[in-house]
Amino acid sequence: MTAPSPHTKRETLMLDTPYVAPEGERETAIAEIWSAAFGIADLGVEDDFFDLGGDSVIAETITRQIGEMLKINLKAGALVEARTVRDIAELLDNASGNSLPSHLVPLRSGGGRTPIFIVHGAAGLLFPSAAFMDGFHADQPIYAFQVPGYDGHFEPLDSVEEIATEYLRCMRMVSQDGPWHLAGFCHGSWIAFEMAIQLAEEGRKPLSLTLLDPGVQEGQMLNDYMRFTRRRGKNGLATAIAELKFGAKSMLDAWRCWRATGHWIAPSDPRCFDIPEVWDYLQKRNRERQARALNKAGSNATEQELTERQWMWDREGEGAFDTEKELELQRTDAANEAISRLKRAWYKYGPHTPLQSRVHMVASEFQNEKLKNPAYPIRRLMPDLVITVLGKYHNDTVSTKGPENARIIQRIADDA
């Protein structure tokens, strides 16, 4: 359902719930924020967020405004479980008893099953639809991580290793000694992978680990892969040609960066994210690439070109959220800074230690073709890999608009 227009009256929506007026100052204030965010007059305190057409952008708007008005901290993900004005008011009344860090969000806290912990993708938080949540058992506890510092209540971290350590600390606050199920979306799969690596160093492992369509990260990981590929050249001439091509591309990229920023550095160099001008240039470059890809998609591009471009939109663009640009406008400065630091952390991450325990991967058709190459980094880092193919493109695989990938995560957890 699309969010109604600013002039929509509640009675025209044919909602299943009867109108219930707010009681007290807190419910009244929250109801006014909801009405403004949805553009609906006279919203009731029992009206469901998702029935009204709520999405991640509206959730971000509501939680930010509630925080500013009431001087409290509310996570956007809270609206997945507390889906009405009254639910939110009760949640805030009981907030003093919640000891979990602000970057761990209970999407569903009830139930006696082993909890599932999900790591966000490039957006820095996971805001699933009601349909996605329906893919899990009704009594399945589910927790989602939100990038540290998103709400300004924690200092952002600068490496995947540090983030993984912090997420393990949070996970143990829910279940000290386990067991745990662990999953990661897109780029966040590498945080989940690092969490499993750190658990392995302790002689532990998650009961299941499910990664949704991760790719080779641009930066240190891609650099390592390119060096490995060149070393595997079948003969001296092939290796020399590969070296020449790679060197020429790096030189051209560095020259373009120098023209734009005054810094001679290839964008694939992990150090470039420490230079603000180069970081801004990379963001602008990726937005322009995405725009060109979209234009190409409307012309006579071949199926192969569109497939490759679809992967690049997600990998270099704005992640798995269709509304990411709108989210960026709604987010606070603290949230945008936390996500900027998160992207730099991914850029610098270059794992070398294989994870010997079993890894389940939900892969797009495009990614599955890459995984057939035994030298592909994911294959080398995850030797015991079980693949489930879901969707043709990356966005299909990591979408939280439907229950498909949630059902797969649940099935893997049930079978563990």
Image (tube, rainbow, N blue to C red):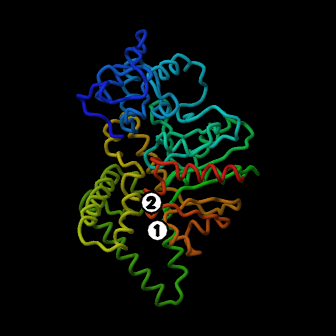
Tell me which residue sits at (29%, 63%) in the image: 293
What amino acid is labelled 1 in the image?
Answer: Phe
* Count of number-bearing discs: 2
Q: Which residue is mark 2?
A: 394
- Quadrant in the picture for the N terminus: top left
In the rendered image, residue 229, in percent from the top left (x then y), is placed at 51, 76
In the rendered image, residue 408, in percent from the top left (x then y), is placed at 59, 53
On screen, residue 296 versus residue 339, left or right, reads: left
Q: Relative to 72, say whether 51 is above or below.
A: below
Tell me which residue sits at (55%, 20%) in the image: 95
Q: Relative to 154, say whether 260 is above or below.
A: below
Residue 240, located in which quarter of the rendered image?
Answer: bottom left
Tell me which residue sits at (70%, 39%) in the image: 113
Residue situated in front as seen by the camera: 344 or 76: 76
Tell me which residue sits at (57%, 34%) in the image: 106
Residues tagged 2 and 1 counted as in contact (Cβ below 8 A): yes
On screen, residue 406 versus residue 316, left or right, reads: right
On screen, residue 163 versus residue 342, left or right, reads: right
- Mark number, residue 403: none
Q: CA distance from mark 2 to mark 1?
A: 8 Å
Q: Few, some or many C-alpha atoms within 10 Å of disc 1 (few <14, some 14-19, many ≥20)?
A: some
What amino acid is labelled 2 in the image?
Answer: His
Residue situated in front as seen by the camera: 272 or 142: 142
In the rendered image, residue 357, in percent from the top left (x then y), is placed at 71, 59
Label 2 secondary element: helix
Q: Relative to 183, say whether 3 is above or below.
A: above
In the rendered image, residue 277, in percent from the top left (x then y), is placed at 30, 51
Residue situated in front as seen by the camera: 291 or 233: 291
Q: Relative to 244, say whether 69 is above or below.
A: above
Label 1 secondary element: helix
The earlier-in-sequence mark between 2 and 1 is 1
Q: Which residue is mark 1?
A: 366
